[in-house]
Image (cartoon, rainbow, N blue to C red):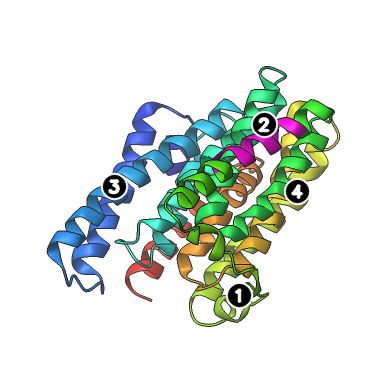
Amino acid sequence: MLANFLDKTKPIIFVVLVAFFFILYFSLIFFGSTDITNEAISGWSIILNVVLYAAVFFFFNFVIGKNNLTYDNAYAFYLFTLFLLVLLDNPFDYQGPLLLLLQLLFLRKIYSLKSSKNVLQKLFDAGFWLAILSLIQPIFIIFWLLIIIAILVHQKLTVHTIVSHIAGFLAPIIIAYAYHAWYGTIPVFESLQIEKYQWDLSFFMTGKLSYFIWVVLGMTLISLIVKSPFTLTFKNTFRRNWLLLLFHFLVVVIIVILLPNKSNFNLVYTLFPATVIIANGIELIEKRIAKDVLFYLLFLMGVGYAFYL
């Protein structure tokens, strides 16, 4: 059934899941509670978001498949599309999916450090994408910790690796500064008000959002507990990426808690490590009927949450 369908990573599965997302995405627009006040702006927002989400799905699938973060299945991608729909509180907002896409471009370089090919180029690119992220939302500078952790976990610590990612980070910063200085203003730097970020859990602990958080957090922790003994026993590249996934989850949770102007969509930034960890836990379930029950239950809960709660 559904578990059997998701057991492989065939292109048709990717197409079906993306189509499933966009069907419910447009359902939220036309049958949800969103008010369309300007048809022109809404139309362009929809087109832009369709492009952004399509790119998000492509790179999400690419990072997982290229770096073998799960077995040959679509469990993580299914969970990602489903959870993304649950957290989609404003289908016209393009900044959220843009930040998500930039994170995936950054993560693509981080997780590929398991390979010894083009390490300096990967780190330069990681620093570059991190700078773009930080210019849009400065709190994402905390992802710099993930670069350092990835370097240490994959045993790539040298003077060259440190310099390369710093150079990549400085490149867009210098370009942005030069551009604004040339025109007489530097608002991009004046807007970096770190004091507005504060540790605040109140938004996530109220209303129906708290139910979603507890479900995903519980599944993530259970998967970590049952999968880690199998993974950490062997010295291989997956063990290193498993450790990186754990640190990634912790770092991105801190970022989400510190974000100003919190919204449901902020939690989407945690979905990459969370869904990959959960997918690895589900892989350990031997009985296919149990997987089917879990996938159908999550589907019913997700649709019910998005449309009825």
Distance between mark 1 and mark 2 Cα atoms: 30 Å
Residues at circles 1 and 2 in contact by the CB criterion of under 8 Å: no
Q: CA distance from mark 1 to mark 3?
A: 32 Å
Residue 8 x, y percent position in the rendering: 48, 29
Residue 226 is marked as 4
The three-letter amino acid code for the residue at tag 2 is Leu
Q: Amino acid at mark 1?
A: Lys
Q: Earlier in the sequence, mark 1 or mark 2?
A: 2
Local crowd size for mark 4, using a 10 Å CA cut-off: few (<14), some (14–19), many (≥20) = some
Q: Which mark is residue 196?
A: 1
Q: Closest to the observer: 14 or 291?
A: 14
Under mark 4, the amino acid is Val
Q: Nearer the viewer, residue 175 or 117?
A: 175
Counting residues from the N terminus, which is met first, the one under dot 3 or under dot 2? 3
Q: Which residue is mark 3?
A: 50
Residue 152, by quadrant, is top right
Span shown in magenta: 163-172
Of circles 3 and 2, the one toward us is: 2
